[in-house]
Amino acid sequence: MTILVDDPVWPAHGRLWAHLVSDENLAELHAFAAAQGIPPRAFDRDHYDVPGDAVPRLTAAGAQHVGGKELTRRLIASGLRVRARDRR
């Protein structure tokens, strides 16, 4: 299993946000997020939204830092991606 985190480029609520995903299964993603103090409310169907200032802590804990395109490619390849049209 690999936990991935991308660059914090998504603005909201006065800060930049990154995405935290698993390339294998959601149970391990949830366990990693809980261990790092990421609240369950940050989960959005296939990823966690995490504040940019958390990225160094997440990578120090074992998350692999990748670019947004790589994160998306690996999330799709994992079969865990929830497409935009399925989010409704």
Image (spheres, rainbow, N blue to C red):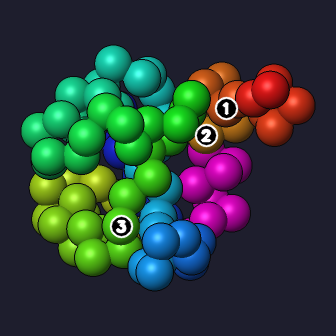
Asked whether residue 25 is drawn in magenta, I would say no
Kind of residue sitting beneath label 2? Leu
- The residue mark sitting in front, 2 or 3, is 3
In the image, taking residue 61 as reference, residue 13 lies left or right, namely right
Assign a secondary structure to mark 2: helix
**Residue 5 seen anywhere in this rendered image of the structure:** yes
- The residue under the point 37% across, 37% down is 41
In the image, taking residue 24 as reference, residue 67 lies left or right, namely right
Asked whether residue 69 is drawn in magenta, I would say yes
**Residue located beneath label 2 in the image:** 75
- Real-space CA distance between mark 2 and mark 3, rounded to the nearest whole angstrom: 20 Å
Give the answer, above or below, for where 52 lies relative to 78: below
**Residue located beneath label 1 in the image:** 81
> 36 or 28, which lies in front?
36
State yes or no: discs 1 and 2 in contact (Cβ < 8 Å): yes
> 57 or 40, which lies in front?
40
Question: In the rendered view of the protein, which quadrant contains the C terminus?
Answer: top right
In the image, taking residue 60 as reference, residue 85 lies left or right, namely right
- Real-space CA distance between mark 1 and mark 2, rounded to the nearest whole angstrom: 6 Å
Residue 46: % across, % down: 55, 33
Give the answer, above or below, for where 2 lies relative to 26: below
**Crowdedness of circle 2 by 10 Å Cα count: few (<14), some, many (20+)?**
many
**Crowdedness of circle 1 by 10 Å Cα count: few (<14), some, many (20+)?**
some
- The residue under the point 45% across, 53% down is 49
In the figure, residue 10 lies in which quadrant?
bottom right
In the image, taking residue 28 as reference, residue 31 lies left or right, namely left
Question: What is the magenta range?
Answer: 67-74
**Residue located beneath label 3 in the image:** 51
Kind of residue sitting beneath label 3? Pro
Assign a secondary structure to mark 1: loop
Residue 9: % across, % down: 56, 77
- Real-space CA distance between mark 1 and mark 3, rounded to the nearest whole angstrom: 21 Å
